[in-house]
Image: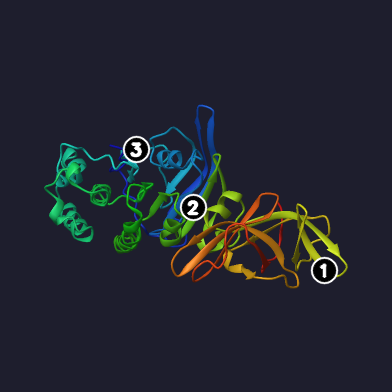
Amino acid sequence: MKESQGQSNEKVSHTDDSRPWLEVNHLMVQQGPFRLGPVTFSLGYAQCGVVIGPSGSGKSTLLEALCGLRPSSGTILLGGRPVEHLPPEARQMALVPQDYALFPHLSARSNILLVPRLRRLSDQALQERFHTLIRLLQLEPLLNKKPDQLSGGERQRVALARALVLSPTLLLLDEPFAALDPQIRPPVRRRLRQIFKELGTTVLLVSHDPMDAAALADMVYVLEKGQLLQWGPWDQVIRQPLSPYLTDFVGINRLTGIVVSQGDQRYLQVGTLLIPVHTTLPDGCSATLHFYPSHVTIHPTPAPHTIPVKVVERLDLGDRFQISAEVSDGVVVTLEGSGPPPVSIGQILFITITAQPQPDQ
């Protein structure tokens, strides 16, 4: 069972709103040929942070290093108190792995109370915490059932109760929604957000789903190839993405080219295509257009400053449609609109883009 809950000689408490609750400085993990970091970031008290990145980027390794399950260098502070020198059981953290790691021979109740019983903990505060979690997570009908009698969502709630019962100072969740059917993820996300806020729990979770980040994240952290490329408030990060992975993650189109001029008109040249833009960047500057599908206007016929594109995929989503269109030399952008798709595969459309190119780093 991957749990890193524990008691130490000094209980971490929240006393200072002026500094982050979790502070990570130059954390580094060497795992064979793979290296994570050094990474530096922070997370506020009772906030939810979401770590995103492609497979193999080091997301799970980061969680395991924070709770002491992987050797690491650097510093980790909780409430201003260093914990990197402590063993996992003394860091007052809890890690819930992807598979939830429930003991199959134990009931839900016994799984939740296993660690307190092993430590011979049975005080009034623990009992109150247990009953609060049972109420918040709606576990009363499930307490006598074993894991193989529970659905994926029910197993998740049991694992969360087990992780939260000792009031960890930091809750770490590795792909918490991966085993859930897509249709039940939204209500589960909303419910967990309410529970975390009610309990005042600081949470750091790993996810591949942009909707998890949009629904839960106060802060988002972008990992690629072991490096922390970008982090900050969710609404800032999605509007200023610094990596192709992030633009794909949040559904932003990305066109990279060279700024050129023809008379008074400025263009971004992408392959052989000239895209009209408004920019003060100098000619010859390498730049990228980042834009949402909603920033594109579709025209059925050519108009001033339109760009011809070829429809390569069309999705009818009921009250709206989504189109993948080839711009130039295999470069594809996503377009959206309301109602049924008014086009067919192979059709040529004409679009205008409302966005300003940003210089490449």
What residue is at 35 percent from the left and 61 percent from the top?
Answer: 186
Mark 2 element type: strand
Amino acid type shown at disc 1: Gln
- 256 relative to 58 in the view: left or right: right
Q: Are marks 3 and 2 in contact (CB under 8 Å)?
A: no
Return the x and y of residue 286 as percentages of the image width and height: 76, 53
Return the x and y of residue 6 as percentages of the image width and height: 28, 42
Residue 251, placed above or below residue 114: below
Residue 154, placed above or below residue 305: above
Q: Quadrant of residue 87?
A: top left
What residue is at 15 percent from the left and 51 percent from the top?
Answer: 142
Q: Circle 1: is it few (<14), some (14-19), or many (20+) Cα within 10 Å?
A: few
Q: CA distance from mark 3 to mark 2?
A: 20 Å
- 23 relative to 138 in the view: left or right: right
Work out which residue is located at the far right of the displayed protein and give it: 263
Work out which residue is located at the far top of the displayed protein and give it: 32
Amino acid type shown at disc 2: Ser
Mark 3 element type: helix
Amino acid type shown at disc 3: Pro
The answer to which of 311 and 226 lies nearer the viewer is 311
Mark 1 element type: strand
Which of discs 3 and 1 lies nearer the camera? The answer is 1
Return the x and y of residue 76 as percentages of the image width and height: 45, 44
State the residue position of label 1: 265
Residue 246, placed above or below residue 61: below
Q: CA distance from mark 3 to mark 1?
A: 61 Å
Which of discs 2 and 1 lies nearer the camera? The answer is 1
Q: Are marks 3 and 1 in contact (CB under 8 Å)?
A: no
Q: Tell me the quadrant of the picture where the N terminus can be found.
A: top left
State the residue position of label 2: 42
Which numbered marker is on residue 88?
A: 3
Return the x and y of residue 347 as percentages of the image width and height: 63, 61
